[in-house]
Image (spheres, rainbow, N blue to C red):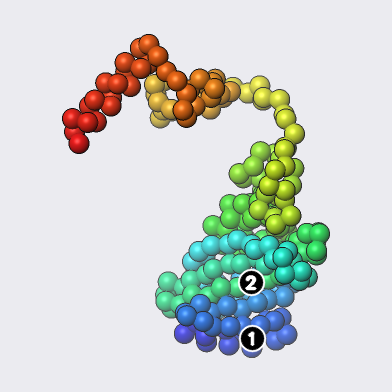
Amino acid sequence: MSKKVLELLTAQFPGAVLETHSQFGDDTAVLDPAVWRDVALFLRNDPRTLMNMFVDLTAVDYLWRGDVPRFEVVCHLRSLERNHRIRIKARVGDEEGNGAEIDSIVPVWKGANWFERECYDLLGIVFKGHPDLRRILMYPEFEGHPLRKDYPADRIQPLIPFRDVPNTGKLPPFGPDEGMSFGRQSHDFALHGPGASIDGDEAVSNGKRAGALEERS
């Protein structure tokens, strides 16, 4: 059935479906990025497809291949009524990663919101028309996009001052004795990190825990 969806796409968007392939149950259409959102709307609304379930969205950096466009945006969709699925792809960006832009599909499937933000944050893909396109994993001052193949593994990010904001302590449902504070870290890795020596009450406490584990084993 998914192969029929590829045939429908090719007929509906002549010239904009650059290639298709089917292998081991994965049916894929590579699209001209200009029709990205139009194809999404068609797949969701057409009664022959009814792709009402957004599954996943990400991107791949093919810098090592030297091809242009450099990135592939990848989206997985499924129809619960028709019980078929499809993968759509679009290629964007030049060798330097510039011009990596494509329309947002959040207006089609709201569930794509955080997926597109993650893709923007880690790979620098800009989703035009996204309602709130900002970093989601890295902090706002982070420079660059860490999943790009040309991001230096040893890069040092600039230091930024701690933000003076309220509620940096433990928040509900965490109690005062649970976990770490959300604010400035106060523990000393030199004293309490892996392999650090301990003495006094801490050593006695750890000894009791070890003894209890031995009794249970």
Residue 103 locus on image (x, y percent): 70, 63
Q: In the rendered image of this protein, does residue 148 appear above or below residue 183?
A: below
Q: Is residue 82 above or below residue 158?
A: below
Point out which mark residue 10 bears: 1
- In screen coordinates, is 209 left or right of 123? left
Q: Residues within 10 Å of mark 2 (few under 14, many from 20)?
A: many
Give the image quarter of residue 74.
bottom right
Image-based side of 207 in relation to 164, left or right: left
Tell me if 206 is positioned left or right of 15 in this view: left
Q: Position of residue 165 (x, y in %)?
A: 63, 23
Mark 1, other Cα within 10 Å: few <14 / some 14–19 / many ≥20: some
Residue 180: horizontal and vertical position, in percent? 47, 26
The residue at 28%/27% (across/down) is 210
> Which residue is drawn at the image coordinates 60% and 73% (left, top)?
88
**Quarter that holds the C terminus:** top left
Residue drawn at (70%, 57%), measured in percent from left and top?
Answer: 149
Instruction: Inspect the image, locate mark 1, and give the three-letter code of the amino acid beneath it.
Output: Thr
Rounded to the nearest whole Å, what is the CA distance between mark 2 and mark 1?
14 Å
Q: Nearer the viewer, residue 55 or 45?
A: 55
Query: Who comes first in sequence, dot 2 or dot 1?
Result: 1
Residue lying farthest top?
A: 200
Q: Nearer the viewer, mark 2 or mark 1?
A: 2
Q: Secondary structure at mark 1?
A: helix
The disc at residue 181 is none
Q: Secondary structure at mark 2?
A: strand
**Residue 124: percent from the left, percent from the top?**
71, 54
| Residue 133 in sight in this render | no
The residue identified by callout 2 is 89
